[in-house]
Amino acid sequence: MDHNDNQTPQGETARILVEFLEVAITSIVFLKGVYPNGAFERRRYMNVVVHKARHPQLRDYIQSSVNGLLPFIKKGLVERVVIIFFNDQNEPMERFVFKVNLNLSYGSKVEEANLEFALRSFLIKLPVSESLTKTLPKGCRWEITSYFRALPETGKSKDAEMWIPTETKQWQQPPLITPIKSMNSEPLGVQLYLEHPSLSKPEDGILRGDG
């Protein structure tokens, strides 16, 4: 990874966002009760008590998926990062959507404290949003899926090779959307919302982490 690239406002912001997404996705998986509580341990992040995955396979899947997005977030290619929960018929039941907007023309110094303070509010909001979510049935599964504004060139990037086009079932008609939290702290804007079936046509440019 190019160290100088990380010193740009976009590189620094992408690094903070990826670190945040790893924590936030783990928090969502804990919230949904997919695994026993013993699969997680409590820790502090941004001065908030969060949960970290203890199981190596779970931890590595989340970590490698979001870290694999880093070069594409820096280039403004990633539009949404989505955590999808499926029933035992492999049909989507619930989607947590992080919509990301990185200002590529921003050239000033990133105020890291302001950015982290804005992202911290998502971690505070998530646990109290459980009442907005659905109870998952036994035998459900989940995955991390990313929507790109343009598909990365897999031949030129080792990071792109771990992302493969997905055949994940999409909503068949427009979903019900429930906003949870949004923030804007230059050069980053993030929205978090829930999608539930009522269900859109499959979209182009969808990639999922090959965990």
Image: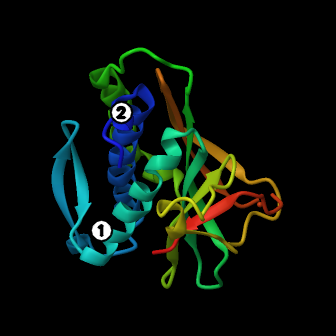
Position above or below: 17 against 142:
above
Q: Residue at x 40, y 73 (%)?
A: 34
Q: Residue at x 24, y 73 (%)?
A: 39
Query: Could you say where residue 94 lies in the image, as x and y percent from the top left?
Result: 59, 62
Question: From this viewpoint, is residue 136 visible?
Answer: no
Residue 152 placement, left or right of 130:
right
Question: From this viewpoint, is residue 87 visible?
Answer: yes
Residue 124 placement, left or right of 202:
left
Position above or below: 42 against 20:
below
Q: Earlier in the sequence, mark 1 or mark 2?
A: 2
- Residue, disc 2: 12
Query: Could you say where residue 110 lies in the image, as x and y percent from the top left?
Result: 36, 21
Quote the CA–CA distance across marks 1 and 2.
23 Å
The tag on residue 121 is none
- Residue, disc 1: 59
Q: Secondary structure at mark 2?
A: helix
Q: Nearer the viewer, mark 1 or mark 2?
A: 2
Q: Residues within 10 Å of mark 1 (few under 14, many from 20)?
A: some
Mark 2 is on which residue type? Answer: Glu
Residue 71 placement, left or right of 12:
right
Image quarter hosting the C terminus: bottom left
Mark 1 is on which residue type? Answer: Arg
Q: Residue at x 38, y 47 (%)?
A: 18
Query: Could you say where residue 193 lies in the image, as x and y percent from the top left?
Result: 57, 44
